[in-house]
Amino acid sequence: MADKIHLKMTVNGQPVETLAEPRELLIHVLRERLDITGPHIGCETTHCGACTVDLDGKSVKSCTVFAAQADGAEITTVEGIGSPDKLHVLQEMFREHHGLQCGFCTPGMITRAWRLLQENPTPSEEEIRFGMAGNLCRCTGYQNIVKAIMAAATEMNAAKEAAE
Amino acid sequence: MIPAAFEYHRPSELSAVIALLSEHGDEARVVAGGHSLIPMMKLRMAALDHLIDLRDIAELRGIEVGATIRIGAMTTQHELLTHAGLAEAAPILAEAARQIADPQVRYLGTLGGNVANGDPGNDMPGLMQCLDARFTLTGPDGTREVAARDFYEAAYMTAREDDEILVAITFPRPGAGHAYEKQKRKIGDYATAAAAVQLEAADSKVSAASIAMTNLSDVPVWSAAAGAALVGSACGTPAVEAAVAAMLADIDPVEDSRGPVEFKKHVAATVLRRAIARAWSRV
Amino acid sequence: MNDQTPPTREERTAALKGLGCARKRVEDARFTQGKGNYVDDVKLPAMLFGDFVRSPYGHARVKSIDASAALALPGVIAVLTAKDLEPLGLHWMPTLAGDKQMVLADGKVLFQGQEVAFVVAEDRYVAADAVELVEVEYEDLPVVTDPFKALEPNAPVLREDLQGQTEGAHGLRRHHNHIFLWEQGDKDGAEAAISEADVVAEERVYYHRTHPCPLETCGCVASMDKVNGKLTLWGTFQAPHVVRTVASLLSGIAEHNIRVISPDIGGGFGNKVGVYPGYVCSIVASIVTGRPVKWVEDRMDNLMTTAFARDYWMDGRIAATKDGKITGLSVHVTADHGAFDACADPTKFPAGFFHICTGSYDIPVAYVGVDGVYTNKAPGGVAYRCSFRVTEAAYLIERMIEILAQKLGMDAAELRAKNFIRKEQFPYHSALGWEYDSGDYHTAWDKALKAVDYDGLRAEQAERVVAFRRGETRKLLGIGLCHFTEIVGAGPVKNCDILGMGMFDSCEIRIHPTGSAIARLGTISQGQGHATTFAQILASETGIPADNITIEEGDTDTAPYGLGTYGSRSTPVAGAAAAMAARKIRAKAQMIAAYLLEVHEGDLEWDVDRFAVKGAPERFKTMTEIAYAAYHDAIPNIEPGLEAVSYYDPPNMTYPFGAYICVMEIDADTGEHEIRQFYALDDCGTRINPMVIEGQVHGGLTEAYAISMGQEIAYDEMGNVKTGTLMDFFLPTSWETPHYTTDFTETPSPHHPIGAKGVGESPNVGGVPAFSNAVHDAFRAFGLTQSHMPHDQWRIWKTAQDLGLHG
């Protein structure tokens, strides 16, 4: 066993510190050491995207990142995207359009969609299907997830226009 | 799927990386995006005592576009996809990068990792052979260049020494006639077969052609004969079929869950025909 | 209230969000915010982590196990082997199918990935290190992965523990690797029909081995509280109450001292019905160490060891007159059950409800025989998003119909219509012993054909064939038809049980004084949205808005006993229990209302959310007022409170059906495909929540798409699993997944209190034949009769190659 190292990150806007072995995967540090259990473990081979978090402005699969690599990083998980008092429009639209069933993939889906819409605020259905292809869902068949993301984009753009 | 323990290093100078590699020999590995290495570590198929993270080495980054294109080894697939200058100068890179893995993997997966790892399933090695790229390697004895076409020896075996790292990839700015055609089972899969094609034309005839194939041997296959078969033609059926025949003579696929050898050869021929047609239409 | 215009009946109905309302799901608030509580989120003080040493071999003798190096590793608490479990009688455990299964390797291993030793350590990292340090010496034994070879006279003996036993749980064993022969129907009659027929279509149809692969793997946390003598077990259980009973019987801990909790479950699809060695080992480890023990599979463990599905070799013969009237059906199945018969079926049905394989058709005589066989593959045999073996049955009959149509030279849509059970024949007694409760197949079929412009598609296909033959295109067009009949809602206690527990289900309702309510059921949602939809049933029945009703499931200390959620049984059985319990509430409420209004009970009528005096609708008491009175007023001869419980024993199964049509483009050179159109018409009886139904259909179709077009658990001849990760085990992404159009007809079940039939599994049952038939249909003009699934690229290419389509 290697010695533990001291990690500092910003998670959902909060500075956090923890000790971890270098080999500990980011998903495990988030879930086990920082009690952030929104991101889930689905496949462990970088296919399913249930562990997706936002790391320095990129959607990443936290099962394939060592926490040590994320030392100093800014991380956003589904817990940081909205709050119980003010849900993010993506969270609202996933509910509105039945974009989830068992809920296991949902945190990764929403976190990924959140980044996707920042990079492309007006995606076509094809762009959403391509941009979400790193996240597997076993329940919904994706159709309503795509619909939810489309609807969220529309709402967000309308809100932006109204604000301008 | 839990990796074995190791010591983590994150140097900020290239010289420090080389020093660590020299010190620990084959007990050390560098990690770029990690999307080849970390899964192997989790399956305990890659054993190492020292992991050297390259993320803080500034000189491994950056894209320079001129008559020659230079791409730092730590450039991610996502950066290849979104770099405007590159999109204009060498659009085949984005066309290929788009077909690699999925968005999350492309944010972290690097060009350098993809070419240096030696995995025959990776797409960039074949493409780099097609583009006649050169790999810049730095080690304790300094820096040298190796042609992509000479780099690959066998699966996971390359011309890179254990104490060297890949710093950058350079290649001459390619012409417009390009295509990267890949057949796979789904997003995230390796190629059943993929073809990288660059064509140049003069007087409505092919004046130069370069063809490389992916995941059809234990190394990427640059088929000089396939390219030669197109030169002087207008990519009509006889020339294309000659190129396909030449390519088929150069590949050596093995059966896996994507299918048997005969199928892979058939797909290799089909993707090459399509790639040639698309590249020719863009010349 | 000064409101001068009281809400209309329609407004009051809408306010309930009851039956038929596309009510948004109450579950989603926590799931969209990352606040679900799945088993791996359970974290207890001093909790340990367990992990398995697994067999790399498909068949081997275990010569020795040396755990000393593992035990020397700091942080390792224990390493359990069969020797440790034997004194407790727990080194083997009974299966749901009347067989027994090794918990940890007892002398030999019978499939790759089999559990050999259980390492218990401070955390999952140390446990993984320790697994590497356990040294196991194996001696190779010959491997059998082919069920036909397993039945050859000289085949290796797989189950040495059964040697000499010629009788199994389901009758005679005629070979050392034979498990049972199970038969239904009239064998002689079917033979006679076949020998006398104008036309007989005969084919071997393989439904390959696959896996439910929910996104969350299986796992549990066992916590033995030695002070109170109580065991608490959190786990991914689709049937928590049955797990409690089994845990009690196995461990000897009294059932009241065991509490089983299914928290949020990240998809099940049948994977989480079985009882797995990980659960047993975690319980034992917690008892031994006195600390909570968590075990969670990784994805490879999941795909390799827990709960495969299908693996049925089906030999069908279907007989018909020359004008296409079906006269008989005979089917023999060679069923590969793997190393232990751990199929999750009702006890008396070792081949599940496979004998629904007469499908939607009026077939006068039929026979089914199923031989169960042991091989060196993982045990399981679960109903992966289907009622027990119903997807196999639907696939068989829908392939046989297509093949028969080919042989008759008849259009397959017309052949179906010609043989459908007619509306007036319901309730219909099938040749294999089922009583189909209701249906209107012709209406659904005609609607489907019209919706896709079936005749237009056939014309386009004919043109395409001509163009292909001329060399103008390399793409073929397939039209995949399917009309399926499901059988769900197991089931009547008289013939359906799991380990002796009748397959009733239950609901308990408490109305609170202020008129809101909590209801608990014996089922457990894995994404189906029970907390939303059961509340809708109760809203319509009790007049309490669904938003004021909490639904709870999955905690055996609080919920009434039920058999759980699988086989689309929640709505047909627990949903019925909910309606029946609600009606008991209403009966009492009527008595209370009569007292309050000073009228006779018979003078009252139910009106959406209240009892009103007949002929004087302005005199009424709402359910809210009645609930308050139930707790407040001293009402003569009526007990205080307002609660009810119902245990519902369904009188019959329900028979949802549907008509699916898939239009597929196939590239003859690369084997690639594109789903151009998929139309799915479902009839699930009364529709509780159209939004949830549509979601279920989308999801089930996507699983069907995966299964038909690429997903499989494949073994090589050495018994190695070739598809152990999601690189090779096909789960489609949003990119590959087609777009679906859904539609419906509504034929209520006559015996279900609200007429509902269940829908969760229909799309998988009907989807697989539709996708597969589309592939077959694309090559029909070139003479293809059968090519086995999954239709991945190389297999489609091989079909084209074998038909000479590559020039």
Image: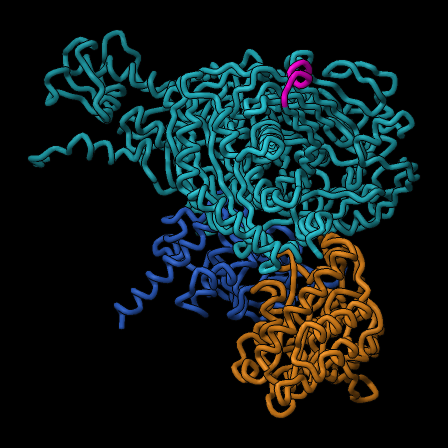
Q: Position of residue C321 (x, y in %)?
A: 58, 21
Queried whether the magenta region covers residue C194, the answer comes back as: yes
Q: Residue at x 17, y 8 (%)?
A: C600
Q: Position of residue C295 (x, y in %)?
A: 67, 41
Tell which of C178 and C14 is nearer to you. C178
Q: Residue at x 77, y 71 (%)?
A: B247
Picture quarter containing residue C59? top right
Tell which of C1 and B43 is nearer to you. B43
- Measured along the vertical axis of the image, is residue C207 above or below residue B25? above
- Measured along the vertical axis of the image, is residue C403 above or below residue B161? above
Q: Does the image show residue B211? A: yes
Tell which of B163 and B258 is nearer to you. B258
Q: Main secondary structure of the magenta part?
A: helix
Q: Does the image show residue C649? A: no
Q: Residue at x 50, y 15 (%)?
A: C435
Q: What colour-coding does the image apply? A: by chain
Q: Residue at x 71, y 65 (%)?
A: B269
Colour that chain C carries in the picture: cyan
Q: Could you tell me which quadrant the C terminus of chain C lies in?
A: bottom right
Colour that chain A carries in the picture: blue
How many marks overall? 0
- Measured along the vertical axis of the image, is residue A93 above or below residue C359? below
> Left of C81 or right of it: where is C441?
left
Queried whether the magenta region covers residue B227, the answer comes back as: no
Picture quarter containing residue C353? top right
Q: Could you tell me which quadrant the N terminus of chain C lies in?
A: top left
Q: Which residues are magenta?
A: C191-198
Q: Position of residue C12 (x, y in %)?
A: 21, 32
Residue sitting at the far bottom: B67
Colour that chain B carries in the picture: orange
Tell which of C591 and C579 is nearer to you. C579
Picture quarter containing residue B63? bottom right
